Image (cartoon, helix red, strand yellow):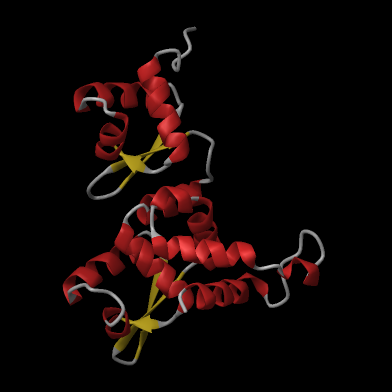
Amino acid sequence: MDDPLELETRRRIYQYLEKFPGAHMREIGREVAIPMGTLEYHLHYLVKADLLTTREDPRFTRYFVTGGLSRQEKDVLAVLRQKVPRQIAAHLLLTPGSTHGQLLTKFDLSPSTLSFHLKKLVTRSIVTQEKAGRENLYRVNDPDLVARVLIAHRESFFDDVIDRFADVWLSLEPRDEAMPGESPPGGGMLLVYQVLSRAFA
């Protein structure tokens, strides 16, 4: 059987997605400089050959190298490839339980645009929404998973906010307080809040 990556065009697509998992077709075509019709054919071929997998959102099909990430990581990254949801999620890691009004003071967005992105994050189970009186409170559903995805793929985001977050995370040394393989005292949630408090100060 022929090697699906023997063709240079397919190899370039595959290598790009190794570096930028979760990219959609227009991003790939722009960066790899392949016409859309040709790119669509090769993406379809690579998916059929089980070298790529996909995640759908309302606007795009996003592509991942098969076996590179867990299902949960792909689901999260498919959403966090978008700048606004990514920065909202990062802010909610720092300030869990924020209201819609509080988030509006932190982002240059209209109320309807913020609601649109929050709904997207809630629908994808990245953020949870809970009622507290007349307010809705928002928090990240799995802080450790989301923080791990942000750190692992920071270089592909080209996002100063996430770069600052990553620098602080990597500078922390809580390991000498825990045995190998154990979480630091206080659990992962506490560590996430400490990191983000320093990153966004």
Q: Residue at 47%, 35% (x, y): give it.
A: 18
The correct choice, above or below, for 39 with respect to 145 in the image is above
Left or right: 31, with 201 as reference point: left
The correct choice, above or below, for 101 with respect to 4 in the image is below
The correct choice, above or below, for 191 with respect to 162 in the image is below
**Residue situated furthest top in the rendering:** 1
Image location of residue 53, percent across then percent down: 42, 35
Q: Residue at 55%, 58% (x, y): give it.
A: 148
Q: Is residue 109 visible?
A: yes
Image location of residue 122, percent across then percent down: 35, 66
Image location of residue 137, percent across then percent down: 37, 82
Corner quadrant of residue 161: bottom left
Q: Residue at 76%, 64% (x, y): give it.
A: 182
**Residue situated furthest bottom in the rendering:** 133
Q: How many marks?
A: 0
The correct choice, above or below, for 102 with respect to 17 in the image is below
Corner quadrant of residue 79: bottom left
Left or right: 165, with 30 as reference point: right
Q: Is residue 125 visible?
A: no
Image location of residue 101, percent across then percent down: 27, 85
Depth check: 129 or 31 in front?
31
Q: Residue at 35%, 21% (x, y): give it.
A: 45
